[in-house]
C-alpha cells in the first residue's frame, strides 16, 4: 500500500521532542511582539520567513537566531499560556495524539515571574486544549483516542547573564564561583521546581532535559540535578550527539542515566570521537550502540532540524536514521521546532518514508515507540490501555484508507 501524506496525517502520532519556544505561530509572535514592544526584523509572516524562520540556515547560530525573538515575547504568563494552547491545537489538527512539550523555565523567569509561574502557564494552555479536544464526541464515545501531554523542563548546559533576568540574578549572586558549578546549581534548582510541580500540584512535568552547546559543557556538571530527578522518578532525556561526538551520548547515559537521547546523530561516527583515551573507537561505538539497543534507550530523531544544523548532512538519505533502523534501535520521529524548522510531525514522518523507503510496518513501529517510550503521566495500566487504543485506531485508519 502506498503511504501518502494524507494517510500519515490521519494516523495517531506523537511528538516527544518539541520545543515550545521554537514552535510558536509566526502570526502570534508578530501580534505579541507588537503588544509588548518587542522589536522584530519584520512584522509580516512572509518577512519573518525571509529573515528569521528560513527554509535553510547557514549555521547553527543562524538557526538559533529565531529563539531570541520568540523568548522575548514569552516573559508573560498569558503569552506563554496562549503559545502552549496554540501548539497543542496545531498538533491536534494534524492527528498528533500525544506530545511532550519542552522548554527552559529559567529562560522565561525573572522579576515577578517564578519558575513555577512558567510551568503553570504552559500547563494551563496545554490542559485547555486537551479538555476541549477530549470533549469531542468521537473521543467521548471511545471511537478515537484522546489527546494527552506531558511537560519536560530543560536545564541549560551553558548560559550567561544576557539569557534572562533569572540567569543574570544567579550569576550575580555567585560571582566568586566557577562557571561550571553555577550551571550545575541552576540545573539543580530547575529540577527542584519540576519535582515540586509534579508532586505537589500534579502538573505533569514528566521529565527533565539538558539543552545547549555540547562542546566544552559536559553532562557531568549536571549530575547532581539528574540524580535528584532520578530519586524522584522523573524521567530523563538529554540532547546529545547533535554537535559533538559519541562520547557525549555515552556521558548522557553513564553520568546522567538518560532514558532517551535527543538527536544522537553522531552515534555511528567513530571519527567524531575526540577523547584520546579512547583507543579502539570502532569498539567504543559498537558497544555503545548495543547498550542503547538492548536497554531500549529511545532516540528522538529530528530529521529536518538535523539537516538544517549539521553541515555534514547533505542528503536526507545520509542521515544516520538508516543505521538506527538497521540496528533495531528504538527511535521516534519528532519535529524539534515546528516554526524554526518549518515542519510538522506529518511532514517528518512523510520525509522519513520517502528518504528511507519505509514500509507501513516500519511506520507503525515508529509510532509504537512514540507511544510506548514516552513519559506518560498516568499509571502503567492506563498507559498500556492508551497505547493499545492508539494502535487499534492506527489499524482502523489504515483499513478505512484501503
Ligand atoms: Zn531539541
Image (cartoon, rainbow, N blue to C red):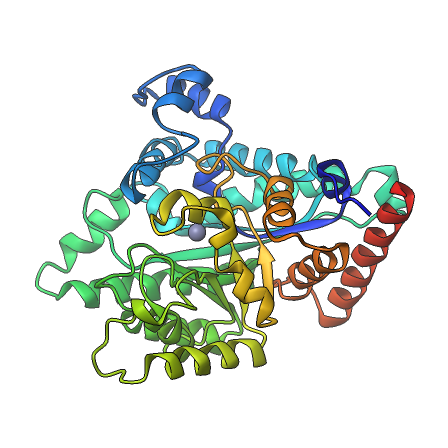
Q: Is residue 36 left or right of residue 166?
A: right
Q: In percent of the image, x 45 and y 71: which residue is there?
A: 229
Between residue 16 and residue 153, name the one nearer to us. 16
**Residue 115 placed where, x, y %?**
39, 51
Q: Give above or below for 131 relative to 241.
A: above
Disc count in the image?
Answer: 0
Between residue 81 and residue 330, name the one nearer to us. 330
Q: Is residue 18 visible?
A: no
**Residue 175 placed where, x, y %?**
10, 58
Q: Give above or below for 285 relative to 341.
A: below
Between residue 237 and residue 327, name the one nearer to us. 327
Q: In percent of the image, x 39 and y 15: which residue is there?
A: 43
Kindly give the residue lying farthest to the left in the view shown: 176
Q: In percent of the image, x 45 and y 45: which residue is there?
A: 305
Q: In percent of the image, x 34 and y 32: which residue is there?
A: 72
Q: Is residue 321 left or right of residue 137?
A: left
Q: Quadrant of the C terminus?
A: top right
Q: Give above or below for 108 relative to 171.
A: above
Q: Give above or below for 74 relative to 299.
A: above
Q: Is residue 70 left or right of residue 157?
A: right
Amino acid at each position: 500500500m502506498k503511504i501518502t501524506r494524507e494517510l500519515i496525517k490521519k494516523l495517531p502520532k506523537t511528538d516527544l521532542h518539541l520545543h515550545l519556544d521554537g514552535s510558536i505561530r509566526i502570526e502570534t509572535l508578530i501580534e505579541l511582539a507588537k503588544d509588548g514592544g518587542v522589536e522584530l526584523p519584520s512584522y509580516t509572516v512572509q518577512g519573518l520567513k525571509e529573515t528569521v524562520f528560513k527554509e535553510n540556515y547557514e549555521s547553527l547560530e543562524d538557526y538559533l537566531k529565531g529563539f531570541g525573538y520568540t523568548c522575548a515575547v514569552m516573559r508573560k504568563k498569558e503569552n506563554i499560556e496562549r503559545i502552549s494552547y496554540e501548539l497543542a491545537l496545531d498538533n491536534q489538527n494534524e492527528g498528533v495524539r500525544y506530545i511532550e512539550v519542552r522548554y527552559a523555565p529559567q529562560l522565561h523567569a525573572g522579576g515577578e515571574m517564578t519558575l513555577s509561574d512558567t510551568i503553570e502557564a504552559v500547563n494551563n494552555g496545554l490542559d485547555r486544549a486537551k479538555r476541549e479536544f477530549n470533549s469531542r464526541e468521537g473521543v467521548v464515545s471511545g471511537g478515537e483516542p484522546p489527546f494527552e501531554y506531558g511537560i519536560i523542563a530543560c536545564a541549560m548546559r551553558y548560559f550567561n547573564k544576557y539569557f534572562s533576568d533569572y540567569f543574570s540574578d544567579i550569576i550575580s549572586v555567585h560571582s566568586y564561583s566557577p562557571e561550571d558549578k553555577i550551571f550545575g546549581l541552576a540545573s539543580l534548582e530547575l529540577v527542584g521546581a519540576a519535582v515540586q510541580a509534579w508532586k505537589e500540584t500534579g502538573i505533569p512535568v514528566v521529565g527533565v532535559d539538558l539543552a545547549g552547546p555540547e562542546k566544552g559543557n559536559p553532562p557531568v556538571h549536571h549530575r547532581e540535578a539528574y540524580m535528584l530527578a532520578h530519586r524522584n522518578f522523573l524521567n530523563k532525556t538529554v540532547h546529545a550527539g547533535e554537535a559533538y561526538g559519541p562520547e557525549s551520548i555515552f556521558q548522557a547515559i553513564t553520568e546522567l542515566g538518560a532514558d532517551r537521547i535527543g538527536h544522537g546523530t553522531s552515534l555511528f561516527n567513530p571519527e567524531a570521537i575526540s577523547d584520546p583515551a579512547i583507543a579502539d573507537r570502532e569498539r567504543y561505538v559498537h558497544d555503545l550502540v548495543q547498550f542503547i539497543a538492548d536497554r531500549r534507550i529511545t532516540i528522538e530523531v529530528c530529521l529536518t532540524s538535523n539537516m538544517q544544523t549539521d553541515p555534514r548532512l547533505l542528503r536526507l538519505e545520509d542521515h544516520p536514521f538508516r543505521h538506527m533502523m538497521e540496528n533495531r534501535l528504538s527511535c521516534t520521529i519528532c519535529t524539534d521546532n515546528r516554526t524554526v524548522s518549518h515542519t510538522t510531525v506529518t511532514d517528518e514522518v512523510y520525509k522519513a518514508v520517502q528518504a528511507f523507503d519505509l514500509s507501513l510496518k516500519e511506520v507503525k513501529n515508529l509510532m509504537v515507540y512514540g507511544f510506548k517510550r514516552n513519559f506518560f503521566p498516568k499509571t502503567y495500566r492506563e498507559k498500556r490501555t492508551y497505547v493499545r487504543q492508539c494502535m487499534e485506531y492506527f489499524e482502523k485508519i489504515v483499513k478505512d484508507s484501503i
